[in-house]
Image: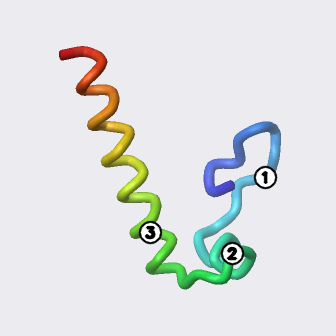
Amino acid sequence: MHYGLNGKEPKSFTEIGELKGYTKARMHQIEKKAFLNLQKTLEGLYS
C-alpha cells in the first residue's frame, strides 16, 4: 500500500493507518519490523 505496488497509487502512513485502525507511528513500527525480517531472511539465503 505504502509503495503503490500492483499498479495502485502509493498511500501515506496516515492513510493506511486510518484504513487499518493504526496510528502513523504504529505503521512505521510495522514497516521497520517487516524490513528487519526481510533482511534476516535474505542474509540467511546468501550466507
- Residue 36 is left or right of residue 10, and the answer is left
| Front in this rendered view, residue 21 or 28 | 21
Count of labels in the image: 3
In the image, what residue type sits under mark 1? Glu
Closer to us: mark 3 or mark 2? 2
Q: Residue at x 31, y 48 (%)?
A: 36
Q: Residue 2, image x and y in percent?
A: 63, 56
- Would you name the residue on which mark 2 appears? 20
Of all residues shown, which one is farthest toward the left?
47
Q: In which quarter of the image is the C terminus?
A: top left
Name the image quarter holding the N terminus: bottom right
Disc 3: CA contacts within 10 A as few (<14), some (14-19) or many (>=20): some
Of the residues under marks 3 and 2, which one precedes in the sequence? 2
18 or 7: nearer the viewer? 18
**Height in image: 37 above or below 18?**
above
Q: Which of marks 3 and 1 is nearer the N terminus?
A: 1
What is the crowding at mark 1: few (fewer than 14 residues within 10 Å), some, or many (at least 20)? Answer: few
Q: Is residue 40 left or right of residue 23?
A: left
Mark 3 residue element: helix
Q: Mark 1 points at which residue?
A: 9
At x 68%, y 75%, the residue is 20
- Give percent across and percent down for residue 24: 53, 79
Amino acid, disc 2: Lys
Residue on which disc 3 sits: 28
Q: Which residue is drawn at 32% across and 27% down?
A: 42
